[in-house]
Amino acid sequence: MEYTLIQIVHLLCATLFIGVVFFELVILEGIRKSMPDDTMAAVETGLIGRVKYIMPWVVGTLFLSGIALAYHYFKDLADPLSSSFHVLLMIKIALALSVLVHFVTALRSGVNGCMESTRFKYTHLSVAIHMLFIVILAKLMFVVHW
């Protein structure tokens, strides 16, 4: 039951995180050209302020629950090439660590006031691609066997 609860928390946090990233990438970037620059800057400032408050908790819980889930397979990870599941899990962990680096870097840039629109866009695009692969790997881990 505990493992299932951790899975549910992990999935909810992942859904929220991915949803926010895709909202910012698809919706905000989609309206950028139709909005005046000062309005878009105000929206980004407001969004960054809210993200700085909520997302560290979401990402922290996402990573802690991910660590708890990976711990379940810790003994098996001593030989990460022993099965397709372990190979895909290791790739997923590497991508997740990259997302964490992106997130911390973006958060620091937002706090320091140096997150300009272009950087905002490309950071979100990179994270979205990473997250897409993580979701695909999460499914493939349980269906691909070699």
Image (cartoon, rainbow, N blue to C red):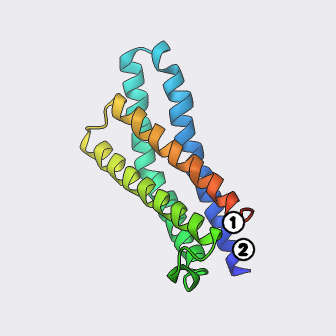
Given the current orientation, which residue lies at the most extreme bottom position? 75
Label pair 1/2, CB-CB below 8 angstroms: yes
Name the residue: 68% across, 77% down.
3
Q: Quadrant of residue 114?
A: top left
Q: Position of residue 38 (x, y in %)?
A: 36, 19
Q: Residue shown at 40%/35% (left/top)? A: 122
Q: Position of residue 52 (x, y in %)?
A: 40, 49
Rendered residue at 36%/54% (across/down): 104
Helix, strand or loop for disc 1 = helix
Whether 107 is drawn above or below 59: the answer is: above
For the C terminus, the quadrant is: bottom right
> What kind of element bears circle 2?
helix
At 65% across and 52% down in the image, what residue appears? Answer: 136
Question: Which of the pair 103/135 is nearer the observer?
Answer: 135
Q: Alpha carbon of mark 1 to alpha carbon of mark 2: how far? A: 6 Å
Q: In the rendered structure, which amino acid carries the disc numbered 1?
A: Ile
Question: What residue did someone put label 1 on?
Answer: 8
For the N terminus, the quadrant is bottom right
Amino acid carrying mark 2 in the image: Thr
71 is higher (above) or lower (below) than 15: below
Tag 2 residue: 4
| Numbered circles on residues, count | 2
Q: Nearer the viewer, residue 17 or 124?
A: 124
Query: Toward which corner of the image does residue 7 lie, by quadrant?
Result: bottom right
Quarter of the rendering containing residue 85: bottom right
Q: Is residue 45 above or below residue 33?
A: below
**Label 2, residues with CA under 10 Å away: few <14, some 14-19, many ≥20:** few
Q: Where does the image place residue 10, in percent across and percent down from the top left?
A: 61, 64
Q: Is residue 68 left or right of residue 42?
A: right
49 left or right of 78 in image? left
Residue 130 position in % (x across, y down): 51, 48
Left or right of 33: which side holds 68?
A: right
